[in-house]
Image (cartoon, rainbow, N blue to C red):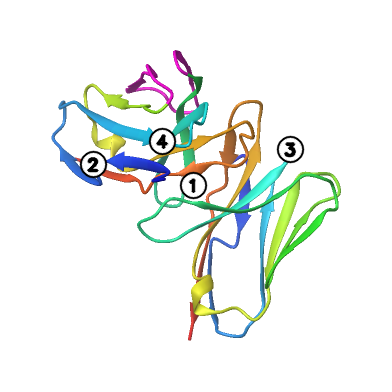
Amino acid sequence: NAGVTQTPKFRILKIGQSMTLQCTQDMNHNYMYWYRQDPGMGLKLIYYSVGAGITDKGEVPNGYNVSRSTTEDFPLRLELAAPSQTSVYFCASSGGDITTQYFGPGTRLTVL
Amino acid sequence: TQLLEQSPQFLSIQEGENLTVYCNSSSVFSSLQWYRQEPGEGPVLLVTVVTGGEVKKLKRLTFQFGDARKDSSLHITAAQPGDTGLYLCAGAGNNDMRFGAGTRLTVKP
């Protein structure tokens, strides 16, 4: 039981490039989330999903897209990377209780 | 503007000292969570408080939810170097949670 896994762990992008951050959970959780964590700013919700085929915007969705074709996977897509997207990205999942979230180890993204 | 304000932002103490960190909001939450995050890792849930005035203890950690369910505190007794980390509070909404910016605690041996 691996919990929530994220790949890659680190990535450097040039401005305008695109990439997909991968997130997989093996706990059969319905709820999945993407957060970004900037220094001194805590965690900001980007997108979330309440089940396969259903996604919704969080606090800071601009510049990102998500999909949820299966219960296990919740990839985050950056289409045109900008320096403002330099951050640490965390994926999380939860079962019926949204207050108990299990986080992945994070992806540190730098856009130059 | 943070929905949840945490204070202090940074705290550095010696092993064996006691400390309290705070989480305050102008909003009422149905529940409030405390997470701890270590460098290079994701946050890990410590506790959830639900009832106004509720006190929960986890070994040397004591969590309290304010009577009006707008604020919470975390008290650590006899801090140890293993308590070092970023302590985040979070409040639950309908389908999501909002996090504070955290208190970064360093406990020196």
Q: Residue at x 46, y 38 (%)?
A: A92
Q: Which mark is residue A8?
A: 2
Quarter of the figure that contains the N terminus of chain B: top right
Please name the residue that numbered disc 4 is placed on. A25
Horizontal and vertical percent for residue A21? 28, 33
The stretch drawn in magenta includes residue B86: no
Horizontal and vertical percent for residue A8? 23, 41
Q: Secondary structure at mark 4?
A: strand
Instruction: Measure the alpha-carbon separation of dots 4 and 2.
Output: 15 Å
Please name the residue that numbered disc 3 is placed on. B29
Pair 1/4: label in front: 4
| Pointers 2 and 3 within a single chain | no
Please name the residue that numbered disc 1 is placed on. A42
Q: Residues within 10 Å of mark 3 (few under 14, many from 20)?
A: some
Horizontal and vertical percent for residue A14? 13, 34
For marks 1 and 4 on the same chain, the one whose residue lies earlier in the sequence: 4
| Amino acid type of the residue that numbered disc 4 sits on in the rendered structure | Gln
The answer to whether residue A38 is left or right of residue B102 is left
